Amino acid sequence: MARVMATVADEGLIATEPPVDLDARAQRFRDAIEGEGLGGLWVLEEDGQVVGNSGAHESGAPGVLSLGMSILPEARGRGGGRALLEAMLEHARSRGAHKVELEVWPDNARAIALYASAGFEVEGLRRHHYRRRDGSLRSALLMASLLGGGER
């Protein structure tokens, strides 16, 4: 999982920046697996190799989970991202979450299209929110999906 994240970080498609400390990141994944709470982790495998992963964690707002995913370039476009997203959404529903949220770079059209096709809507923009190591600033789209049962 850490190697997948490091590869996708090198592409600039996620907030994590290279170089990724593989040992530290692997430990964070182990801690998340062993932890308790509403969150969860999933892997996408092809031929016995991990080619993608996703995670959901508590956002800080009761009943809301934050989602994230990384898929290796060679594994994209074959339905794995949709499968990971569906697994996370089913998990969120089973845990009683009423909403799931995520952030995505505005120029990541492929990911935005996937999320929109699963019912996510743009809720806002974090303009120049993330300072990168090179000093540049990145904006992020805020997208979310209401799972039902929590609206009044």
Image (spheres, grey):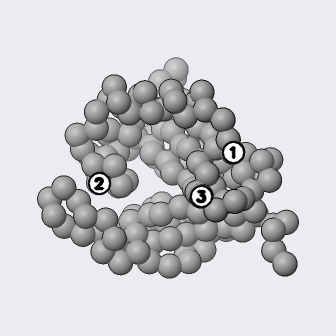
Residue under label 2, please give it. Answer: 12
Q: Write down the residue under mark 3.
A: 60
Which numbered circle lies on residue 38? 1
Residue 114 coordinates in the image, percent (x, y): 55, 61
**Pointer 3 or 2: first along the chain:** 2
Inspect the image, locate mark 2, and give the three-letter code of the amino acid beneath it.
Answer: Gly
Tell me if label 3 and label 2 are in contact, CB under 8 Å.
no
- Residue shown at the point (61%, 32%) measured from the top left: 35
> In the image, 118: left or right of 54?
right
Label 1's element? loop
Q: Residue at x 36, y 55 (%)?
A: 15
Please say whether residue 71 is visible from this viewpoint: yes
Three-letter residue code for mark 1: Leu
Count of numbered badges drawn on the protein = 3
Identify residue type, mark 3: Gly
Position of residue 13 measured from the top left corner of the image (x, y, whole percent): 35, 55
Gap in angstroms between the C-alphas marked 3 and 2 = 26 Å
Q: Quadrant of residue 66?
A: bottom right
Q: Is residue 83 visible?
A: no
Image quarter for residue 80? top right
